[in-house]
Each structure stands twice: as C-alpha cells, then as structure tokens.
Image (cartoon, grey):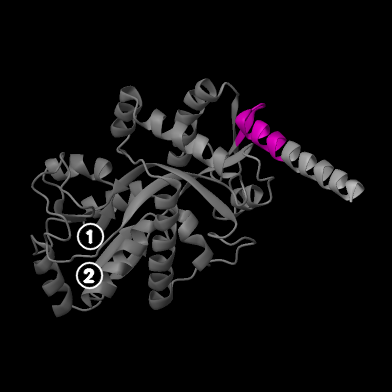
Amino acid sequence: MKGFNAVVRMVTVGVLMGLAGSVTAQQAYPSKAIRMIVPYAAGGPTDVVARLLGPHLTRSLAQPIIVDNRPGGNTIIGTEALAKSAPDGYTIMTMAIAHTIVPSLLPTPYDPIKDFAPVATVVSGELVLVLHPSVPASTLQELIALAKSKPGELNYGSASTGGPLHLAGELLNMMTGIKTQHIPYKGAAPALADLVAGQVQMLFSPPDTAIPQIKAGKLKAIAISGATRLSALPQVPTFTEAGLPGFNVKNWFGVLAPAGTPRPIIDRLSNEIAKIIAIPEVREKLVSLGMEPFISSPEQFAALIRLDFAQYAKVIKQANIKLE
C-alpha cells in the first residue's frame, strides 16, 4: 500500500510539474520572432494592414514580427502554409474576407473554419452602390423597379469574378428578384473608370475611391451597406433605410492562427491588436486609407467568418459562379 501511495504521489507531482511548465511557457510567450503570413503580394491592402500592425506588435510583444508574403492560388498558398504551421503562436496570418469566399469557388486543402483559430478583426469597409448619372433612378427602390422592367439589360462592374464586389451584386439580385449582368474587370480602378465613362451602369465600390466622383457629380450614390450612414456621405441612406434590410456586405481584414493554438496566446494577441487599433494615430492612418477600425473578440470574429462563409456560399451556388 505504501508503495502504491508513493507511486500516486510521484504521478501527481509529475502532472502538476507538467501543468506548471505549460503555464510558464504560455506566460513566457512570445520568446522568439513571430511570422505573419500575408496570402497576397506586397503592396495590396492586406499587406498594408499587416505592415501597419507589425511594428506596433513588435514593441508590445518585445519580439520581431516578420511579414511573410505568400501570394498565389487565390490566397490558398499562404492560407495552407498557416494551416500546416505549429499551433504555438509563432505563425499567424493577416487575411481578408476572401477567406470566406475562396473555398466555395475552388477546392482548398484546408477547412476555412475548422483549421483556424480566429484572433481578431482589424479593419472593415462598407460598400456604396453607385450609378452612372444616365441611369434613370435616384433611389434603391427606383433602381429595383427599373431593373425589373428591363431584366438583364442593366449591368454592373466589379474588380474580379468571385470577389466581394461581384458577390454584392449577385446578393442584390437574389434579395430583390432582379437580374443584372456582371462585367468583371482586372481591378477596382478600371471598373470605376468604365462606370464614370458610362460603359457599365452600376458598381459596388469602397466609399473612399468613389467619393471624389460622387462629389464631382460624375456618379450617383443611392445606398451604403452598414448599420449607419457614412459621415463622408451623410446624404446616402443605408440599405435598411432604402428598404432592403438584411443586405449585409462589407470588406474586412483580420488575423488568424492555426487551430489548436492555446487560448492564452490567442487572448494575448487579440488584446494587443485591440490596443493597437485604438491608438489615435493608427486609427487616423486607417481612416486615411478608407478603412474603419474594427475591434472584435475571437468569438465575435469566429461568428463573422461563419456568417459570411454561409452567405457567400449560398450566393455562389445560386448564381452558379465559377472561376476559370
């Protein structure tokens, strides 16, 4: 019996020491450089967000943040690299809403929800629906009535096939029963230029790129996504105010870690990112780039990913959207 009790004590001490070691290791995090994957080429908006976060995280965590651009495969290459990384907090990824869209368009070697641990959102951006002045509609309801009277005759541009600007147009078709034709471009800038030139009739656009054209009278803005009106466009109603509640589309950027990353590490990173976004000069920089600071908890971010994944999967299936 004494021998048995001695064994139990040894096992108990071993377990407690192991737990203590685990806690100590997590408390010591981070003890080396952290790699931040960006699944896009340098210079794009996701890369800009990562490089804005990087220096601030380096100071707050007292370890270097190394931005690792892994473009290609419609974000699949970089995202797969994250999924295969050790869940120890030393590899994270700055990503965009495309994470919730790509898996419905292409086969991916990862599950967009199960294989990742949401850390925090960073910024978001609403979309404004703009029309060429020649379109005989000044409100959303007038546009819907016009489109119903001319099914398939109105067209809208977007930055790419399968991107959020394209899917916003298809979601509008679905929710209102209209049929408008999608015209894809290689980027948002040429799509906006053709809208101003009257080559397409409408476009969902990030507000910052469309505002100069709206204020110059070259475009008409009839509705904006989001719960409240934009301070820069106070005259433009939200989709809910315009008679289409439930039209929820926005661009957003966030940070993911591999699934299985310890919760204390997730919380540490999430809290540090929230503090950074709240810094006045960081907020000012984001706003100057046409972005809105967007703070959320890991649970809120996880819910957003699930919501957008389900919404866009439905849109892609119903509109039969495919990437060639």
In the picture of the structure, the residue carrying the numbered disc 2 is: 154
Say which element carries label 1. Answer: strand
- Quarter of the rendering containing residue 66: top right
Residue drawn at x 27%, y 42% is 209
Decide which of 198, 227 is in the foreground and name it: 227
- Residue 231 drawn in magenta: no
Say which element carries label 2. Answer: loop
In the image: residue 157, left or right of residue 47:
left
Instruction: Tell me if mark 2 has few (under 14), some (14-19) or many (20+) residues whose alpha carbon lies within 10 angstroms of its own.
Output: some
In the picture of the structure, the residue carrying the numbered disc 1 is: 202
| Three-letter amino acid code at the position of disc 1 | Met
Residue drawn at x 45%, y 43% is 120
Residue 127 in view in this figure? yes
Residue 269, position in %: x, y?
Answer: 51, 36
Range covered by the magenta-colored residues: 19-35
- Extreme front residue here? 1
| Three-letter amino acid code at the position of disc 2 | Leu
Q: Which mark is residue 38?
A: none
Residue 192, position in %: x, y?
Answer: 28, 50
Placement of 88 over or under 286, stated as above or below: below
Residue drawn at x 28%, y 74% is 174
| Number of marks in picture | 2
Placement of 8 over or under 47, stated as above or below: below
Q: Earlier in the sequence, mark 1 or mark 2?
A: 2
Residues at discs 1 and 2 in contact (Cβ within 8 Å):
yes
Residue 17, position in %: x, y?
Answer: 75, 36
Decide which of 229, 29 is in the foreground and name it: 29
Placement of 67 over or under 153, stated as above or below: above
